[in-house]
């Protein structure tokens, strides 16, 4: 067990989150099981508040800040679901929030974040640009920085997804989790390994965003070129320091999927489970449908988010033009 | 309490269905609550096996047929979800099934029904055409007829939706149910009225498919011209005999919604709950968003089905051309 966080940190996070987040349902589909060749238990974090698991870590972080720090406010950076999760968590706790976003942010995502009452600051186009600007503003104003994944409180919050999943389906043999910066993967791995030491724990990355897979092979954190995968929530270029420590120790394997495999999974989920799942949220099912994960057994799959507009979904899943 | 079916019939149905159907989750969305001005508890029968509640009644009917009748086989008629529900129920019970469908059936719906192992017979374009052909084939081959709604076993099966909903949310003040032939409405009304006598029970029909509303006003079953609403599962032209008896006695009110209101509800459900809901399944939310149902209280809403293709959904929800 790594010392960064333990099962107890995740249980404590769950107590803090109990009245705040949805205990998202487990959805089953026998048609999907037949296609995947396994019994799938879909943990529907796409049905979570603000459309993704991110509120869990963000709330668990902000609620533990000292009163004076909460009064001053928090700052975060994100181009997607973390922004909305932080904005919602801060608004629930009445904490002033500022989010640094890329200058290229989609208008709908900006509006959704502002709707929760957060201030928006634009900075550059890369995660590094946003991180640097957030650090500057934090120092300047005395705001607390809410990182997207590399923080024990964030990881413990995200681990409550696995706590609920194993509470509902205690006999799981395999757990499949999307991997971006690694916060969800790390938190869930700690919980799952503690509860079921023999469980197979598998992370999934888009093929061109395989920084964690490469880092595991190299035995150290490796930086990759900026990915262009449609799974926009998983475009991290390097694993977190803390998340990588945990993943290296507890995760059995990282598998990768192509954008076409992600599209196929999104369509299959739409047709057979009636769930709207965004590209990043569908990588687990993509890996299973592509036969990348050897599992004929009870398999928990985290559908991490559902924030995709109808028009974008229709466009993403349209048959390729010209063949 | 009408004599046709009682709460006990629904409890017995639930026992038969326990290992067969999904206990579909209750989904909440605070954003949706704010728009509707009520606390909504969405009963997600769009996540049910075969994509709609229909398997409940069909299975409850077929499993109670005598062994000899089951061996001979069953026949049913439908242009939509009932066909798939019957086909799946028959296949689970190893009962040969024939479904009479319109000559105009969509290829995808025909394929989905055949995938469950049912034989397809085409007959005319109206429900009356299909019903007549099914009666003929039943007489000719000794097949048992599985009606879409006007049968105590079907109504009791559909009533298990409300049994589960009230089991999960016992403090509901209002129940909102789509009304086509009335099988779901009748079964749910019997259960809800027995459990919570003061509950407000509201049915919803598309504006041009308001046969039940007109029949209640007239005090007798009234036939209307064939509706053209996008809610293809609710295009009944006259209420069932048995369903109407129950609805007349137990339902407080029928409200109607326009196709545009249904479209708005489908888009809102997609964006804020990440659920794929077909037009017929969205009428309850449509009525609430349009302010047709006075309820500031705990309101159960049955999302009855999710069988709509992505392309059809995108087309249905596209902004109107030239306006």
Image (spheres, coloured by chain):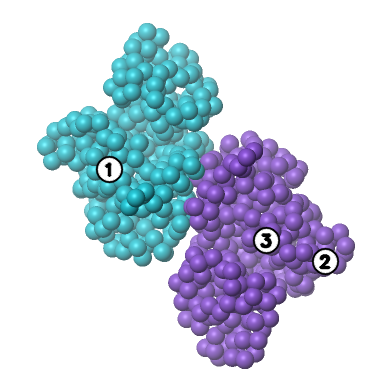
Chain colours: A purple, B cyan
Q: Position of residue B258 (x, y in %)?
A: 27, 47
Q: Chain of mark 2?
A: A
Q: Which residue is the extreme one toward the top?
A: B140
Task: From the top left corner, tell me how far across and down residue B42 is, in percent.
Answer: 40, 52
Q: Please, which chain is the residue tagged with disc 3 on?
A: A
Ranked by sequence position, the earlier of labels 3 and 2 is: 2
SS at mark 1 in the image: strand
**Residue lying furthest left:** B218
Indicate the position of residue B298 as horizontal and vertical percent values.
33, 59
User: Is B135 above or below relative to A90?
Assistant: above
Specify the label residue B206 is tagged with.
1
Distance between the Cα atoms at labels 1 and 2? 58 Å
Measure the C-alpha gap from mark 3 to mark 2.
Answer: 15 Å
Q: Is residue B288 left or right of residue B42?
A: left
Q: CA distance from mark 1 to mark 3?
A: 43 Å
Number of numbered labels in the structure image:
3
Q: Chain of mark 1?
A: B
Q: Which mark is residue A222?
A: 2
**As rendered, which of B258 and A23 lies closer to the eye?**
B258
């Amino acid at each position: 067990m790594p010392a960064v966080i333990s099962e107890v940190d995740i249980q404590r996070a769950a107590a803090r989150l109990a009245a705040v987040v949805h205990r998202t349902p487990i959805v089953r589909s026998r048609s999907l099981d037949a296609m995947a060749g396994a019994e799938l238990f879909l943990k529907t974090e796409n049905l979570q508040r603000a459309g993704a698991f991110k509120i869990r870590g963000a709330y668990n972080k902000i609620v533990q800040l000292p009163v004076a720090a909460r009064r001053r406010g928090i700052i975060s950076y994100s181009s997607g679901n973390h922004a909305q999760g932080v904005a919602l968590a801060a608004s629930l706790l009445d904490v002033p929030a500022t989010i640094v976003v890329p200058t290229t942010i989609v208008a709908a995502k900006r509006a959704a974040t502002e709707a929760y009452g957060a201030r928006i600051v634009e900075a550059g186009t890369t995660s590094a640009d946003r991180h640097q600007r957030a650090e500057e503003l934090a120092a300047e104003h005395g705001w607390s920085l809410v990182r997207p994944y590399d923080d024990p409180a964030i990881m413990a919050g995200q681990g409550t997804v696995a706590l609920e999943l194993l509470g509902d389906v205690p006999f799981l043999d395999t757990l499949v989790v999307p991997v971006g910066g690694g916060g969800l993967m790390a938190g869930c791995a700690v919980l799952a390994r503690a509860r079921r030491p023999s469980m197979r724990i598998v992370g999934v990355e888009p093929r061109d965003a395989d920084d964690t897979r490469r880092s595991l092979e190299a035995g150290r954190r490796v930086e990759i070129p900026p990915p262009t995968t449609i799974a926009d929530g998983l475009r991290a270029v390097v694993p977190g320091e803390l998340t990588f420590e945990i993943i290296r120790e507890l995760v059995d394997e990282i598998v990768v999927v192509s954008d076409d495999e992600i599209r196929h999974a999104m369509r299959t989920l739409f047709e057979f489970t009636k769930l709207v799942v965004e590209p990043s949220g569908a990588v687990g099912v993509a890996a299973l449908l592509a036969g990348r994960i050897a599992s004929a057994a009870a398999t928990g799959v985290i559908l991490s988010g559902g924030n995709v507009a109808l028009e974008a979904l229709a466009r993403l899943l349209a048959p390729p033009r010209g063949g």
